[in-house]
Amino acid sequence: MAEITAALVKELRERTGAGMMDCKKALGETNGDIEAAIDWLRSKGIAKAAKKADRAAAEGLVGVASDARVGALVEINSETDFVARNAEFQALVAETAKLALGLPGGLEELKTSHLPSAGKPVELAIADKIATIGENMNLRRMARLAVANGVVSNYVHNAVVPGLGRIGVLVALESTGDAAKLDALGRQIAMHVAANSPASLADEDLDQALVEREKAVLTEEALQSGRPAAVVEKMIEGRIRKFYEQVVLLRQAFVMNPDVTVAQAVEGLAKELGTPVKLVAFSRLAVGEGVEKAETDFAAEVAAAAKG
């Protein structure tokens, strides 16, 4: 039996909003497995979170660069948010994003490519900034989208300066239609992605492990209703359909006009332009997404320093 620590109970409470005793019981039922405990709480109707909560703990910036039919995102992390306001750091992120535009090889290619202003590979340029700014930094992620015909639109949320912010999004639309109108819709969809964080573009792209996990939770929840098996089956079908509508981009209600889905908004533009328009890809990076940061007890540090 795994030890159910106070810290584990606290984390589960923060992620589900459930009470302390319910969290403790859930962890006991699942041998301390926090992911399984979340599902257990949801199946009992105690926690209703649709997905695992993001814990964006690291600091830094996402840089966005685009050039008509190509777009790139980079995430460079730092230890504190003070660095994100540092002009040197901002210039580094912006130049790295621009460099990424021409690098289809991905993150490893970017790390070893020369940064023009520094005259050395990106990873060495970052090492220099660590020495001058005095804080650890890390080029963590990169995304790049390109289309032969159409546009790659972008959006930056919580921008500190143009092209740099906490969340960066790229959206690729393929079409031979009017580029300005394509980009206008692409930017709106990018804003939608920033706000809704879809798990996939289309049904077939959705991680089946995620679907099976959701189905298991919904099945357990439905069985507890005490209704006949045939009714339970229909309940599960309806709830899974609703789940797809929540997490698949093309199925989501469009934030700019909730009366239509994102797919219908794209179809509407195609009719207006008189030519096919296809949403082929999107990418979303949020600073620190999925990175755990150790909590610092500043009061304890100050007390220790005073004693020393």
Image (tube, rainbow, N blue to C red):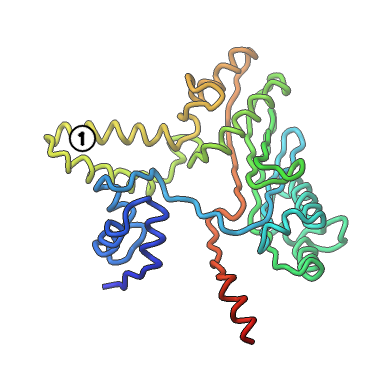
Whether residue 298 is situated above or below residue 188 in the rendered picture: below
> From the viewer's perspective, is residue 134 above or below residue 167?
below
- Depth check: 2 or 184 in front? 2
> Where residue 297 appears, x then y in whole percent?
55, 70
Q: Quadrant of the C terminus?
A: bottom right
Q: Secondary structure at mark 1?
A: helix
The residue labelled by disc 1 is: 233
In-image side of 201 versus 304 (left or right): left
Residue 244 seen: yes
How many numbered circles does the render carry? 1
User: Based on the displayed image, in which of its 4 quarters is residue 276 positioned?
Assistant: top right
Residue type indicated by callout 1:
Glu
Q: Quadrant of the N terminus?
A: bottom left
Q: Is residue 277 above or below residue 76?
A: above
Q: Residue at x 29, y 31 (%)?
A: 238
Q: Is residue 216 something one can see in this rendering?
A: no
Q: Identify the residue at horizontal 28%, vertical 66% (top origin).
A: 31
Determine the residue positioned at 32% across, 66% down: 32
> Where residue 62 sits in the image (x, y, percent)?
68, 49
Pick the residue in front: 199 or 20: 20
At horizontal 38% and vertical 56% (from top left) the residue drawn is: 13
> Residue 22 appears in which quarter of the rendering?
bottom left
Front residue of 152 and 55: 55
**Residue 227 locus on image (x, y percent):** 13, 35
Asked which quadrant contains residue 36, the reply is bottom left
Above or below, comparing residue 180 to residue 203 in the picture:
above
For label 1, the crowd category at 10 Å Cα-Cα, with few meaning under 14, some 14 to 19 and many 20 or more, is some
Q: Nearer the viewer, residue 23 or 74?
A: 23
Can you give x and y, in whole percent of width and height, for residue 41 in the image? 29, 51
